[in-house]
Image: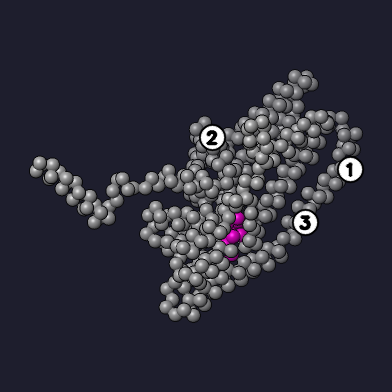
Amino acid sequence: MAEGYDMLKEKYASKLKKQLRGEPLEEDQPIRTRAYEEFKKEYLPKHLSWYEKACNLSEKILNIKPDKKKIPPLQEAIDICHLNVTPTGATSLSFLAPMLMILFGIFLGGGVFMVLTGAPSMFFIMSSLLVGVVLMISLQKMPFFLANQWRLKASNQMVLCVFYVVTYIRHTANLELAIDFAAEHLSPPLSLDLKKVVWNVETEKFENVRESVEDYLNSWRKWNSEFIESMNLIIGSLYEGDESRRLNSLDKGLEVMLDETYEKMLHYAHNLKSPITMLHMLGIILPILGLVILPLVVSFMEGVKWYHLFTLYNILLPAGVFYMGKNILATRPTGYGETDISESKHLKKFKKVDFKIGPIKTSMDPLWGSVSLFLICMFIG
């Protein structure tokens, strides 16, 4: 009896000792990795999850490691997008996908055309080599492109984010609740970043929300200094003793964000003339001239077939114009406040079409129906 009493006493004494020292008990430790994966899966866009799967599969097949100097910027871009990949996986995909593309072009131009026409098509073989090289360069830059796209979308919501935070703190001087309020009313990707800020506090990565916010602001130091200055003014208002000075600090934070954004817009509009002219020439003038020139090419050159013109006119030229347009948009300033209402939890269900097949009710993305209809019409002619 005394032995059992001593064991029980020792057990509860050790528990009490852990609690007094601040050491968490084993049964109370949060499963942070699994919880964060579920949290990220709920908000991460689907196209990024496909890229993750492709990178992880490529890493298992090739496992090509990048140069040591390229690993830190690659890892930084991956962290910005909240991607669950490694720099090795991203580099492996940039080699595997072009290799498959080149092999497909050789199979199509050498094998299929050899069977159908009796001679290989050097046009498709050379086109696949060219597309493979371009694809390799593009995929090597893909993490930076995704990170830049993520930053642009997040930056476009920063004016609204500052407004939400200022509005909440005017009413209730609590930074954590203000960040959570802004995260609930903003759409991804900035809402994901803000939820991650609160998440880092809840999982005890940081002791308080101010440290978590400062860590997040450091990731924007190279791209959006006005957002950092504005948030620092807002945080500083929490330590003002006088009510009028607190409100002035909040107004100053919002004013800094608006003025800097307006000035960036003016510079961008001034420098936009030459890129838009180039895009207009390639996307509008060149296709119109092609309608006149390409039939003459077919008439005067015997080796040119219809599929050569189809590849150049309907695939390569639109892809080049699209890539150039994306690069122009990537340099635009932030702050125009784009909001996609289709990402709302209540409206997301309307993005798919519901239909019944007997007792079974299912839903389908309209894109698949459109692609199927296009393929049917294309084969019918």
Residue 158 is inside the magenta segment: yes
The x and y percentages for residue 31 are 38, 45
Quarter of the rendering occupied by the N terminus: top left
* Quadrant of the rendered image containing residue 33: top left
Between 167 and 209, the one lying in front of the other is 167
Report the amino acid beneath label 1: Val
Q: With respect to residue 238, does 33 lie above or below?
A: above
Give the CA separation, mark 3 to mark 1.
Answer: 22 Å
Residue 58 circle label: 2
Q: Which residue is drawn at 51% across and 37% down?
A: 56
Q: Mark 3 points at which residue?
A: 277
Residue marked by disc 1:
292
Q: How far apart are marks 3 and 2 (CA)?
A: 39 Å
Q: How crowded is mark 2: few (under 14 residues within 10 Å), some or many (20 or more)?
A: many
Mark 2 and 1 residues: CB-CB less than 8 Å, in contact? no
| Mark 3 residue element | helix
What's drawn in magenta, residue-wise? Answer: 151-159
Label 1 element class:
helix
**Quadrant in the rendering for residue 209:** bottom left
